[in-house]
Amino acid sequence: MAGLRGAGDVSMSDVTSLTAPEEAKKVEERARNTTAHVIIVGNEKGGAGKSTVAIHLAVALTRMGKKVGMVDLDLRQGTLSKYLNNRKKWCEKFNVTLPNPLVHKIEPSVARHLDEIEADESARWAHAVDTLTEAGCDFIIADSPGSDNYLARTAHGYADTIITPVNDSFVDFALLGEVDPDTFEVSRPSQYSEMVWECRKRKAIFQKKTLDWVVMRNRVAMLDSRNKRRVGDGLKKLSERVGFRLAPGFAERVIYRELFPLGLTLLDLTEHGSTVQFTMSHVAARQELRDLIMLLKFPSLAGQKIQF
């Protein structure tokens, strides 16, 4: 029978009870002490390729034998949810079984007052982490929205790893730091960088754990350019100042746009039913994904050979 191997929607119990302070506190405590490695793919700008990175990372880890859970934090646009729904339809159409993560859907709060909405969203996120942990997930990957909101900030506070894709543009660079328009020198970190820094401090103080922040240059142009070099130089200087690690990321390829409506990833192109011709460009793209996973250095993958 066609389907998504190891996949499914994790149904959410009635979360209205989670707004009760005592119950919410218990769920949050369990969630913050989750045994799963929590990965937030996030920044505060749309169009950087967060959903593409999230789904490729999830499928890669699943193919490596890990149980992966996913949460779409973009409750308005829901790009990741649409991607996964397209994947489900493709499997049904071609009677194919593909590896896929467990999916936990968070519904928008129906509360009317801001403080109630924030408490509700915190409870829903903690419940998502707690439920996916109980389901045995080794990794929980959350795709954050391209904007600043309370739910995204809350999720960042749970992260073990934050992956921030940025395009080779000073528009995207502004997400991380301000640049002098005359010298292109970094003048100061941005609001997002400061938010991640605060998350790091809180995690170190209250959980005695480190938060690894990786910035990856995404949709990188194949050809060299002055702008590309300037952005690269700026990111290197900012990484030394703010403390994130730099990853080479994914090159600009048309294939990523073609894969979304199919719900497929680069790792699915040789599956039965795929009409996408597998080329050397796709081989190179797969290597970029391997390079990213190697750079991330997840503890549970230590010594494991990356085979996909």
Image (cartoon, rainbow, N blue to C red):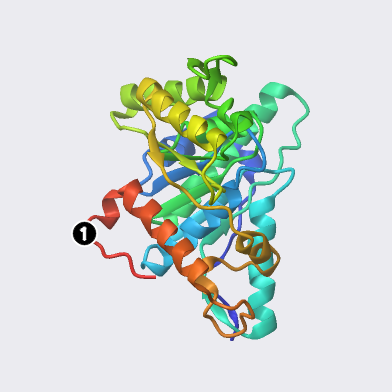
Q: In this figure, which residue is indicated by the disc labeled 1?
A: 303
Task: Report the label total.
Answer: 1
Q: Residues within 10 Å of mark 1 (few under 14, many from 20)?
A: few
Q: Quadrant of the N terminus?
A: bottom right
Label 1: which secondary element: loop
Who's the residue at 69% across and 29% down the image? 117
Q: Quick check: 69 above or below 142?
A: below
36 or 183, which lies in front?
A: 183
Who's the residue at 61% across and 53% down the image? 12
276 left or right of 187 in image: right
Who's the residue at 43% across and 44% down the image? 38
Q: Quick check: 200 above or below 280?
A: above
**Which image quarter: residue 84?**
bottom right
Q: Position of residue 296 (x, y in %)?
A: 35, 47
Q: Position of residue 151 (x, y in %)?
A: 61, 34
**Which image quarter: residue 16?**
top right
275 left or right of 292 in image: right
Q: Quick check: 113 above or below 132?
A: above
Q: Amino acid at mark 1?
A: Gly
Residue 238 visible in the shown view: yes
